[in-house]
Structure formats: structure tokens, C-alpha cells
Amino acid sequence: MIHTKRLLLSLFLAVLSVFACRSFYYSREVAFSFEAKVTQPTEFHVSFSGKNARENEAVRKLAPDTRFQKVDFILPVERLTGVKLSVSSTEGVFELRRLLLSGTRKLSLSDQNVRMGAEGMKDFKQTAETVSGRVGKVGSLTVILPAPLKGRVYFVFSLFFSLFLLSFLLFYKISASVPGFLQKMGTGWSAFPDKKNLVFLIAVFALLLIPSTKIDFHSVVSRENRKLAAPARLTINGRVNNSFGRDFDEWFKDRFAGRDKVIDLYNAFQNTLNRKFERQGVIIGKDNWLFHGRIRNFRGTDGFSEREMEQIRDNLARLQQFCDEHGIKLYIMVTPYKHHVYPELYPDAVKRSRETGRMEEVEAYLKREMPGLNFIYIKHALMKERKTRKEEYLYFKTDHHWTPNGAYRAYEQFCSLKGLTPFDRAAHEPITVTDFQGTHYSATRLWNVENDEITYYSLMTIYKITGEAAYEPETTENIVNMQKFNTRDKYAAFLDGNNGYSTIEGRGTGSILVVKDSYANSFVPYLTENYAKIGVVDFRNFKYGLDSTIEKEGYDEVLVLYNFQTFIADTNLIYITRPTTLQ
């Protein structure tokens, strides 16, 4: 039997409840997007002004690439009056195109009334379609709007309907149960006329409370290797935060009890129903091997132009000339992508159009144009090792890096070229770290992936120097920071991550300077067997020249060890020829 008064009262209370919670499902926002091409690791951060604007802490990080990459921001604001785009890099060149602000109407850079101003930029240029410049450290671009841009409505109907329905049912059941509850209070369970309503209410509240039973308040980084959402704030700068619901939702989704189990269950469900082999820029190969999502590179359809080849040659010629002037030998080693070494584990749906790829083209070109250059493309040696040592993994299944085994095989090739005796792994006790989940796993959270292992050897000490400092070590520690094996980024244990400049004591003779990216981190420790001193520089975190550094430290050789992508996209090698600011 339907009670009209009870029904109307429940509807009225449900409407009030949903209105009070409108920030959960309703807000206004402006979409800000552009395409960017950068030569250095670069961070973009947006701040903006307008009616009911709230702070935006979103940061977009881009790796160096020769191609444009899409960048998107959501600006929660009712009426947008201005946008400031902060660009953080170090002597990095950037180029932006297709800038678009989208609210109730769309504004682009090509609109005559839209203007841009720049601060902290060098060589700033603006055309009707693009913006470009160089950032010394931090620069900013200001978008000047001709008039306020009204944000489009963000309305989640499913959440609105769920809140309304749940509120109505709760109020209806409460209105039906409370009178009987008050009358029968203290008379025992058997006296309640509406036991089903009470059971329903108890079950609903129990289900609502389960995710809150063990909220993770302490974690900073998730299993996806990203920073967890910050706690939501009711007020910002003394004003009510109209996006409190969205902020709370992001915070709660990152921290509710059983979150990882729920994600694993969802991924298992997706893996069963969705047979797509690409997720989050990662290719899911056979036996759940995870590869970087560069399909065109695997197919062999992304060849270099003659101009690009000449640019690579000219850059290496400058580097060779610099080393010749200082009387030191130069060696260049390039590591391949994982899919170059394990092509048979790539999805069958992706077919190769040719067997030779971009790096083989570069290798052949350099042999022809620079026959005296000591250039090593390690792919061929790794493929040979795969055939003779099938039980060894040369690359991690869940990460883009090679394993210490793969690094050792490359080190053996370097020793063979130099006539050196390699580090004897059989004479040392290996240490194995289990449950390593790499960057590709963090992107996909593939539920049934097999965790990797890291095997290393406890060797030597590393003296770190970062920034402008004297040549006394800031800290002294083991070359492998074992504490980092207890964190999510276990690979960062090698060399304690990507420091700007470090020196390592070895047991051999002579000295070598290694210019590197992160692939070299598991390679460098083996060099302690052959050299008395090893310098390590990572130009992503060290923006000084090395001419006086080389003279003062007396390095005999320089080894540039880069991954394929870093080698073709990196412009940092110019720093090696600049005067150093270190004294």
C-alpha cells in the first residue's frame, strides 16, 4: 500500500539532499588542450583566474620526442578570465600548436582577439598557429582572453540519479520504520512489524561503510607509479570550493579499502572481454610481455629523412672533434627497444614491413660517413646472446629497461672492443630482489602479469655531486642503494637514480666518463672491474659543460650510452662542449 504523504515527504527530502550534494555531480569547467614538442624533459602546469575558480595542481610531464604530443587540462571554473601556462625545463626548446580553450564556445590561438604574453622565455616566437621558445629554467605563457569564457556544464547523470534514488529509498524506508521503531523500542526484535525495512537499512549502510573501513591515509604513490590525490578542501582562499565533490571523489578513489583488489578484478574482467593488445600506450605481447607502444618503429615504417641523418652525423662530428681536441677516445653505444630483441613476443596482429629499422639505417649511414667513429649498436650482440643463453632474460617483462643480465652482455661487448677482461660474475655471489613491477605494469596494471626479478652484485661506492659544487662528495654510499629495493621504483636502486654528476671508485686502471640515460644505470657498476675512476653524467639533471671537468678529472675516455629513443631525440650532448661552471 502506497502512503501518499510518506511518498511526498520522501521525494521532498531526496530533492533537498541531492541539491545539497550538487557539487558531486555538477560543475562548470573549461577544457584547455594543445600539442607540444620538447627537446628536454618538460613539465606544464596551468593556473587560471575567473569566477569560482579553484586551484589546479595538475602537472603534465613530457619526455623529449621529435613528434608532437597531446596535452589536456580541465579547468574547473564558472567563467574563465585568464590562463597562465608555466613551463619548467632546463635549456629546453618547446613548440606548441593547436592551442584550444573549450567552454560554451571555443577559442584558439588563431582567433584574432586571443593574445599571448611570455615571461622567462628565450627566442620566443608566436605565429597564427604555433608558439615556440627556449626555457632557461621556468618560463610562463599568459593567454589573454577578449572576454570571459563561460565553462561548459559538467553533469554526471548516473551519479545524480544514483544519489536521488538512494536518498529517496532511504528516506522512504526510514519514514516507514521510525514510527514502529519508536513504539516498539525496548520490546525486543520479534515486536518489530517491518523487519525487512530494518534489514534493508542495515545492509545499505553496511555496504556504504565497507570502503571506508580501512582508508589509506599515508601512501603517496600508487601502484600505477603516480602521485595520489590530495585531500579535498571545503574552502580555498576563504571561498567555498565548488568542486569539493570532484576533489573528494578523486581522493576517495585513490584510497578506499580494497582499491588494488578492485582494480585487479576490473582488469581481469577487461582482459577477458577486451582483446585489444594496446592499453595506456603499452603493447601487451605474448605471455604478457609488455612493450613500449611504438608500433610504427616495430613495423619499420618510421625511417629518417636525409636531413635528419645529416643532423645526427653533424652532432656526433662535433662530439668527436671535442674529444679529439682533449686527447680522449670516444665510444658510442646505443641500446635497442625491447621489441627489437624479442620480436616474436610482439602481437601477431602487428606485421613488420621490413627487417631493418631506423637504427640499422643510422648504423649503416655512420659507417659510410664516419668510418673512424667507435659506434656500437648493441642489438646484434643481444640477439646472438638470446640464441646461446635462452634461459637469460635480457629485458624485464614489465619494464622498458634491460635487465642487469642484458646490461652485462652489452658490457662484455664493450670489453671485447677494448680488449678488457670482463667482470667475472661467477666469482661473486649474486643478490636477487623479487616482485619488481616496472613502468609498463604501472601503466596497465595487468592483473595476471608475472613479476620480474632483479639480480645484482654489491660493488664499490659512489660519490654524488649535483648542481654547482666543489669536487668534495656531498654523500658517499654504495653504488646500489639497497633501500630503494623496498620502494616501487626498484630500478632506481642502481646508481641511486639519475643524478647529475657522480664519480665512482673502481679496481682497475685509467678513467672513463659515461654520458648516459637510465639504461646505463645497471651497466656502469660492471665498469668498476676495469677502471680506477668512473665519472657518470646525466644531462637531464646536469646543465653544465664538461671541458674543464674533463681536464681537471683527467678522463681518458668518454662512453655515450643511450637508449635508441634518447639517442635520436636528445639534444643535450651539446652541453659536453660548453664551458663548465664548476670550479
Image: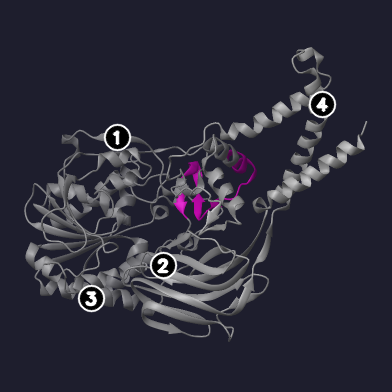
Under tag 3, what secondary structure?
Answer: helix
Q: Which residue shows up at 41% across the image and 42% down it?
A: 437
Badge 3: residue crowd in 10 Å (few <14, some 14–19, many ≥20) = some
Work out how far the residue at label 1 is from the one at label 4, CA to CA, in angstroms.
66 Å
Badge 4: residue crowd in 10 Å (few <14, some 14–19, many ≥20) = few
Work out how far the residue at label 3 is from the one at label 1, CA to CA, in angstroms.
42 Å
Q: Give x and y (percent) for residue 28.
A: 65, 62
- Name the residue that disc number 1 marks: 432
Q: Earlier in the sequence, mark 1 or mark 4?
A: 4
Q: Earlier in the sequence, mark 4 or mark 3?
A: 4
Work out how far the residue at label 2 is from the one at label 4, CA to CA, in angstroms.
68 Å
Q: Decide if residue 67 is in sight here.
A: no
Q: Check whether the beta carbons of the residues at disc 1 and disc 4 lie within 8 A of each other.
A: no
In the rendered structure, does residue 287 fall within the stretch colored magenta? yes
Under tag 4, what secondary structure?
Answer: helix
Residue segment shown in magenta: 268-292
- Name the residue that disc number 4 marks: 179
Badge 1: residue crowd in 10 Å (few <14, some 14–19, many ≥20) = few
Q: Check whether the beta carbons of the residues at disc 2 and disc 4 lie within 8 A of each other.
A: no
Quadrant location of the C terminus?
bottom left
Q: Earlier in the sequence, mark 2 or mark 4?
A: 2
In the rendered structure, does residue 495 fall within the stretch colored magenta? no
| Residue 558 placement: quadrant | bottom left
Work out how far the residue at label 3 is from the one at label 2, CA to CA, in angstroms.
22 Å
